[in-house]
Amino acid sequence: MAVHRSKSSQRASPDVERLVADAISLAASGSKIEDLYWEEHLNTRLMRLLKSQNQNVIDAALDQTFRINTLAFEVLADSAETLAESLVMEHEGQQWDVLLLALPIVAHTRYQIPSGPLSVHGIHATASALHEFIAAPETRLAIVPWLYSIDQMPHSHSQTRLLTESLANAAITGSEIKIELRDMSETIAVLADPRFIIAAVTTPTGKPLFRWQAEAPARVERGMSLIGWQSAMQEPVSSLLPGCEFELLLPEAYFTNCRLADKQVRPMSIRAAVNFMESTVGILPAGLSCVVAAFGEDQADEYRISFSPRGSSDVMYGVIWPLYDRESVASDALNDLSDDESPIKKICDALRDAGVEDVFRHAMLFEPELCDDCGAPLFPDRSGEAVHAEMPDDAPMQQPLFH
């Protein structure tokens, strides 16, 4: 899923330079007519790369613009995402607008969050709720019969485009969805994680896609659509996720909702970790001590949070708070609580909301080290070392892994 920062090592090729130049030109444009000129150039290049599955060039251009021009990065990222998750398709003389939807379920549990095939009942319930509360009256739908974890989602713009095309064809023609679901990757067991149902919604070009775009009496405001969606899907999702608490987000465009779900699950991961420590080793939230530090190579890519018994230096558990493309932290602000929107402020707020009072913050950037033996992430202790988190010997053997 192309919502995480790429780490492409590719040198700048002519295709990369052209993409970067077009994105910078569009970002600098001062008029709508110039916008349209540069958008056409940029989208033509991007579409050629998507069709040839040349994701490396797109990733390299995103990396370069992220380093040199933040506004151009936003322009390029938005254009690549738009072309991957939406299209116009012609069928029997009629043009159809198509949008790929992510239907997020942000869940946490003390056990394991399921993923895998959707039952016929689950598919029908989802389609019914979408038609009633989300999709405009003249739309058609195609729903992938699978409950996805993040590990199983498309991992690039190119892969997402292929999925959009497949679902678009199925929705418009009423044909079978042609997607290979047998070789899905294994899902890592974590305490809190999003799950997704993926669908495509199509409408005749020029007609509304969503209820909140429609004219009265079909029009329903977003807030009411969300309430109806959550009510209709409560029972079907409960049967999909036994033993889990969850929150249903409003079905929306694929990339936007992937980012939103990833961000929503971060504070939930902290609450789940605190609950896990209490239920597993009997330490109440007020008896925990947490250490928070930024990790990355040249910039902060994530924060790692260590959990220890208060008064002890032993790191027993850890949670990762990832940063995404549109989030950045200056090297001199890794520990700054003055900005309410900063990651470190949100982390500290989430810890205190969960009942943790003792929070220590490092001001330096740590190397993103992993354990050489098992590959688990290392977490910061109070002295500034990155160490392996180890539960006590008498703790239950089957433990969920880190988010």
Image: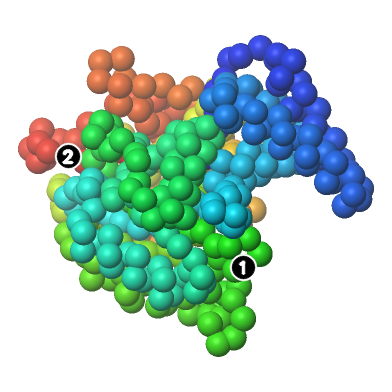
| Viewer-proximal residue among 224 and 86 | 86
Q: Position of residue 326 (x, y in %)?
A: 62, 43
* x and y, in percent, of residue 158 in the image: 52, 32
Q: Marks 2 and 1, how far apart in space?
A: 50 Å
Name the spot of residue 42 as percent of width and height, x first.
75, 35
At horizontal 60% and vertical 68% (from top left) the residue drawn is: 208
Q: Contact (CB < 8 A) between labels 2 and 1?
A: no
> According to the image, label 2 marks what residue?
399
Label 2: how many Cα within 10 Å (few below 14, some 14–19, many 20+): some
Q: Amino acid at mark 2?
A: Gln
Identify the image quadrant of the C terminus.
Answer: top left
Q: Secondary structure at mark 1?
A: loop
Which residue in the structure is indicated by mark 1? 207
Q: Is residue 11 left or right of residue 211?
A: right
Residue 89, x across and y down, in percent: 57, 49
Marks counted in the figure total 2
Camera-near label (2 vs 1) is 1
Which callout, 2 or 1, points at the residue further toward the start of the chain? 1
